[in-house]
Image: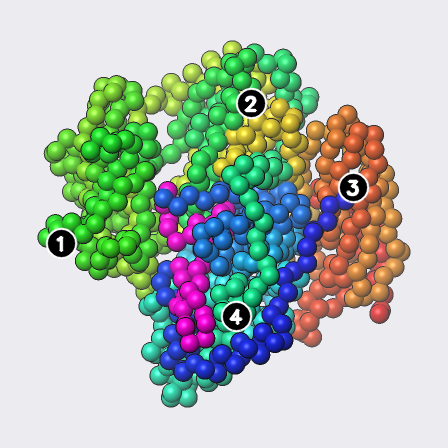
């Protein structure tokens, strides 16, 4: 059985609707038109009653639909991270997940989802690697098309981002990515091209960075590529605060400046039009595209939309997320078939590691959502095994150097009414302006402190709570953020500090991993102590580091800080010894290791690929104590696994969303098969990886076409830890034959049929991958490149037929002299198999003149 995508791209407005949109445009004055082209606030666009336009709401992001609030008061279904989604290689599954996101969006009043992110995994150092799909443009494109079709099939606009070259975070606001023309077209633009053309995406986001000398909000690529080459009829918006000029960005094909109401357009753009420096026809085209987007999402009166999202209740949301997480888990190693575990033989299971009881389900930055719950590996395994199996737990090590936001279980309302904190908004003279009751220790306000609170008068935000000690010991209590913080404990002020970013830091880095100030206090079990954290609201004059105006604007618009609390815990030495003892006494040890928000987040790139802290030591010590050690890697991007050949099994879980623990239990016990295949290479070392650090503001993509697996076989190439496309299941497959035409005309697609047999004892799923190569060709190319793939399933002993379509583009390259796609005539080789390095079947194809 072969899985295929299920729906066509949503249709464009009818000719009659287009005429009506154009008629309404003519009813607007220049001032009305320009007003529409800058956001009304952080997450919405201006309404315009004169043309029947209601307020439109936009929202992050790829791992869920956050809505207009960035905190626990507006919970969102936390879907697996994009790396996990791409690891499924399963387009129908991702399209269904897109439908779930459309349902979530409509439930929150969201019209436009700011996703998917389709920048490539140029290097594993990229801070937002987890937020992107793959290192391969074809896999990225096809998963992105499925995602967009699912979202837009529910009547919600998708926004493909970040166009283009936003593949790293260091100096992202200002860097100029120097990308060769072939690499730009064949790699970095390719996913956008397919998502625009085949996916019919309704919006594109222009990136912060520049490419080849032009900031993307002013880049000629917007018009030359999106409009002229691809006939894109949708809207181009800026990344938040990315638009910094009036006339250059207005003359480019940028349609919407976000957020608002501040920005470089407004009155300045009206004046530029009046002076003849910007053609009003360009403004009209921008407004037309905005109104077209509004019509598509049902925000323009009397222009109906037939699309609507599927219905999901809480149980069906959980089931979809659980299925998707398991489908993305990659079983990288499984010696002696230790997995799946035989439940009947289990009496004691040790679940160990820093991510076992508090798992990481999503990455940091604008992708963050607040799920209604998360299922940890420990909780999921305990629930699945029940009372008949003893499940023990040890943290092993504490890799974080930062203290986390205070967990709700330690916080009590000052009035004794239950768990939580009271937040008060105060004027400069201490007058209360409003208050909130909150259920956590992380706080974010963007542009507003909520209904009834006069935002411009708020000078201080005060968090009041009572900390209750669960266990006796030393507790670290404090605050993190940018600006002035004061902490009082038991009525006494213990610090008054101004926290600042280090020189050159991205402000988003400061928001995601802000500086901290802490105070320690010894408490007895059950003891309660009053805590008050006061924060002076941040303005640009309190951010004393060298940033550009966009950082200043963001600092003025956002108040974001945490109340931090770390309960007592043993030293790493003590916890490792305890974990080893638990492993030695168990039938199997499951060690859950991973990254932290300190090393994997928006706003900064990674400085190394090793697991943080002493996690490698923990794995080795546990595996020495118990040969049946299964390591679950909870990271959004590759990490070095120097012990991978020393443990029984390695399961790569990514950031798998709120159903992590339940999905993990399903896979460990064989209820579900680990369905994932690697969407990116996992390197064995850090040698030769592309850098993220610009030199004099320029980041040169010197590796050209040869990112990831495309560098295989080149000088200095090192075999990876785990290859692109790699992944094991719970059955085995024999690749029997390949059937392909012996020749094909240039410009034509072809169909390849692969016959394979499930030679194992279980029903299974296989991702059949087809790679193209051009031995001895005159055009420089990788050794091989992905040309097509399909997911098949079969019962034990059953044969499956995988029908793989190979596009004409697989045999073409971008000719820089003619400025277009050209087929290299001659013989290509198509190879088929389960990964980029295991390809048992091959066929030669002669590409001739059409």
Of callouts 3 and 4, the N-terminal one: 3
Q: Main secondary structure of the magenta part?
A: loop
Q: Quadrant of the C terminus?
A: bottom right
| Residue 166 is at least partly visible in this image | no
**Spatial separation of the CA atoms under disc 3 and disc 4:** 44 Å
The percent position of residue 837, horizontal first and vertical second, equals 72, 42
Residue identifier under label 3: 1
Q: Is residue 154 left or right of residue 778?
A: left
The percent position of residue 783, horizontal first and vertical second, equals 72, 51
Please name the residue shown 73% across and 33% down the image: 764
Of callouts 4 and 1, the N-terminal one: 4
| Residue 374 is at least partly visible in this image | yes
Of callouts 1 and 3, the N-terminal one: 3
Residue identifier under label 4: 302
Which is in the foreground here, disc 3 or disc 4?
4
The percent position of residue 319, horizontal first and vertical second, equals 58, 36
**Spatial separation of the CA atoms under disc 1 and disc 2:** 54 Å
**Is residue 593 positioned above or below 222 on the image?**
above
Of 788 and 430, which appears nearest the observer?
430
**Spatial separation of the CA atoms under disc 3 and disc 2:** 30 Å
Which is in the foreground here, disc 4 or disc 1?
4
Q: Which residues are magenta?
A: 43-72
Label disc, if present, on residue 428 of the rendered structure: 1
Residue identifier under label 2: 384
Of callouts 1 and 2, the N-terminal one: 2
Q: Are marks 3 and 2 in contact (CB under 8 Å)?
A: no
């Amino acid at each position: 059985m072969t899985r295929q995508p299920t729906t066509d791209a949503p249709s464009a407005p009818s000719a009659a609707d287009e005429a009506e949109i154009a008629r309404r445009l003519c009813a607007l004055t220049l001032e009305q038109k320009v007003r529409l082209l800058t956001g009304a606030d952080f997450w919405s666009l201006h309404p315009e009653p004169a043309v029947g336009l209601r307020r439109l709401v936009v929202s992050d992001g790829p791992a869920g639909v956050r809505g207009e609030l960035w905190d626990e008061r507006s919970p969102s279904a936390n879907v697996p991270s994009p790396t996990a989604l791409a690891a499924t290689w399963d387009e129908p599954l991702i399209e269904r997940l897109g439908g779930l996101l459309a349902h979530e969006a409509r439930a929150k009043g969201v019209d436009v989802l700011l996703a998917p992110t389709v920048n490539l995994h140029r290097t594993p150092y990229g801070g937002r690697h987890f937020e992107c799909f793959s290192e391969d443009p074809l896999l990225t494109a096809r998963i992105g098309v499925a995602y967009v079709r699912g979202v837009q099939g529910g009547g919600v606009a998708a926004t493909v981002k970040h166009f283009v070259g936003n593949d790293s975070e260091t100096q992202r606001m200002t860097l100029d990515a120097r990308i060769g023309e072939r690499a730009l077209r064949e790699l970095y633009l390719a996913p956008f091209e397919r998502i625009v053309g085949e996916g019919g995406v309704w919006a594109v986001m222009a990136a912060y960075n520049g490419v080849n000398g032009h900031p993307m909000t002013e880049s000629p690529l917007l018009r030359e590529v999106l409009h002229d080459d691809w006939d894109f009829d949708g809207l181009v918006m800026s990344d938040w605060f990315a638009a910094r000029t009036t006339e250059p960005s207005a003359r480019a094909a940028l349609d919407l400046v976000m957020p608002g109401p501040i920005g470089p357009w407004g009155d300045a753009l009206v004046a530029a039009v009046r002076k003849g420096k910007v053609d009003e026809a360009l403004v009209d085209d921008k407004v037309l595209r905005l109104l077209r987007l509004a019509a598509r999402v049902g925000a323009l009166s009397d222009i109906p939309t037939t699309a609507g999202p599927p219905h999901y209740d809480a149980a069906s949301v959980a089931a979809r997320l659980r299925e998707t997480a398991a489908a993305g888990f990659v079983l990288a190693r499984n010696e002696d078939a230790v997995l799946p575990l035989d439940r009947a033989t289990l009496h004691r299971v040790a679940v160990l590691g820093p991510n076992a009881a508090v798992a990481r389900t999503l990455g940091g930055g604008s992708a963050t959502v607040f799920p209604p719950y998360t299922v940890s590996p420990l909780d999921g395994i305990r629930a699945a095994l029940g009372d008949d199996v003893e499940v023990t737990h040890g943290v092993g090590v504490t890799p974080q150097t930062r203290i986390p936001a205070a967990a709700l279980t330690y916080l009590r309302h000052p009035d004794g009414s239950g768990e939580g904190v009271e937040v008060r908004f105060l004027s400069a003279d201490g007058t209360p302006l409003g208050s909130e009751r909150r259920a956590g220790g992380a706080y974010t306000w963007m542009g507003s402190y909520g209904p009834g609170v006069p935002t411009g008068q708020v000078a201080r935000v005060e968090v009041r709570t009572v900390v209750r000690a669960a266990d006796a010991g030393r507790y670290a209590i404090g605050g993190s953020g940018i600006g002035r913080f004061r902490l009082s404990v038991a009525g006494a002020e213990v610090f008054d500090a101004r926290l600042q970013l280090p020189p050159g830091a991205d402000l988003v880095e400061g928001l995601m991993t802000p500086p901290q100030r802490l105070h320690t206090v010894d408490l007895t079990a059950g003891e309660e102590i009053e805590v008050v954290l006061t924060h002076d609201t941040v303005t640009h004059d309190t951010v004393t580091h060298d940033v550009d105006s966009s950082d200043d604007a963001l600092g003025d618009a956002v108040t974001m800080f945490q109340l931090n609390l770390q309960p007592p815990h043993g030293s790493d030495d003590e916890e490792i010894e305890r974990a080893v003892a638990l492993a030695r006494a168990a039938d199997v040890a499951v060690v859950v290791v991973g990254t932290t928000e300190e090393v994997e987040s928006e706003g900064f790139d990674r400085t190394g690929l090793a697991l943080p802290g002493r996690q490698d030591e923990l794995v080795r010590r546990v595996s020495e104590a118990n040969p049946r050690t299964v390591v679950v890697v909870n990271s959004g991007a590759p990490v070095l696994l120097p012990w991978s050949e020393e443990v029984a099994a390695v399961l790569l879980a990514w950031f798998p969303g709120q159903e992590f623990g339940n999905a993990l239990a399903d896979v460990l016990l064989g209820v579900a098969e680990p369905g994932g295949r690697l969407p990116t290479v996992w390197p064995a070392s850090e040698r030769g990886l592309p850098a993220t650090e610009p030199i004099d503001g320029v980041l040169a993509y010197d590796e050209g076409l040869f990112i990831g697996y495309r560098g295989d076989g080149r000088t200095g190439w090192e075999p990876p830890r785990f290859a692109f496309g790699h992944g094991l299941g719970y059955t085995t497959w024999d690749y029997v034959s390949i059937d392909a035409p012996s020749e094909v005309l240039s410009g034509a697609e072809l169909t390849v049929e692969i016959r394979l047999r499930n030679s194992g004892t279980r029903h299974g799923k296989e991702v059949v991958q087809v790679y193209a190569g051009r031995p001895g060709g005159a055009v420089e190319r990788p050794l091989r490149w992905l040309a097509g793939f399909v997911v098949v399933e079969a019962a034990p002993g059953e044969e499956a037929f995988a029908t793989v379509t190979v596009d004409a583009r697989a045999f073409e390259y971008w000719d820089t002299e003619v400025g277009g796609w050209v087929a290299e005539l001659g013989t290509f080789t198509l190879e088929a198999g389960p990964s980029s390095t295991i390809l048992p079947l091959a066929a030669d194809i002669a590409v001739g003149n059409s």
